[in-house]
Amino acid sequence: MLEENADYRLTLLAPITVVEGWESIKAAMMMAIPPEYKVDERMATNALNAFRDGRLKAWALSVENNVVALVTTVVVNDTIVGVKILELYTLTGFSGVGFDGWQAGLDVLRVYAKEVGCRFIRANSVNPRVIEIAEALGGNAKVKTIDLEV
């Protein structure tokens, strides 16, 4: 685990940076997507195209110039309720990120979400540690997402 008082930074990656580092970013995303989604190359191509046109964003959480986590986000527009939501599409930690790291990242994402007109930040996870951290950061993890395969 990294030190709690480490100097964490969450940085939005430029689309060209994502394209240049695509194989590593794709691998990180694949680690975060549940296996029941049966991810394939078509999904990877869709993600790459979404990065290129700006719909999907990649963020690197780093400490001392070392990337310790990758977050991808997408703005979802709920036209029925009338709100925009910043959805954490994937979240992959590469080494033991301390609570301060997740707090620092969330602080940056909150500013970004406000800038793009979002009312909420949303994430889905089955990882108990991620849920524990999200609740400690003030998140409501009581709502469950239900996926039914068709």
Image (cartoon, rainbow, N blue to C red):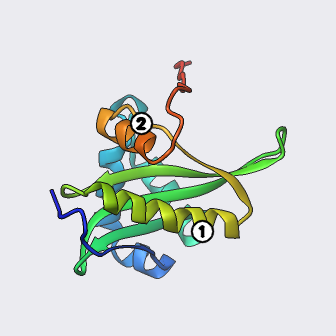
Q: Quadrant of the C terminus?
A: top right
Residue 81 in view here: yes
- The residue at the far left in this view is 1
Q: Position of residue 10 (x, y in %)?
A: 41, 71
Q: Position of residue 9 (x, y in %)?
A: 37, 74
Whether residue 132 sits left or right of residue 113 in the image: it is left
Nearer to the camera, 2 or 73? 2
Name the amino acid type tagged 2.
Answer: Ser
Name the amino acid type tagged 1.
Answer: Val
Whether residue 76 sits left or right of residue 149 in the image: it is right
Residue 48 in view here: no
Q: Secondary structure at mark 2?
A: loop
User: From what the image shows, is residue 143 above or below residue 140?
Assistant: above
Whether residue 125 sits left or right of residue 148 in the image: it is left
Q: Residue at x 45, y 76 (%)?
A: 13
**Residue at image mark 1:** 111
Q: Residue at x 68, y 65 (%)?
A: 114
Report if the CB atoms under discs 1 and 2 are less than 8 Å apart. Answer: no
- Pointer 2: residues within 10 angstroms few (<14), some, or many (20+)? some
Nearer to the camera, 50 or 108? 108
**Residue at image mark 2:** 125
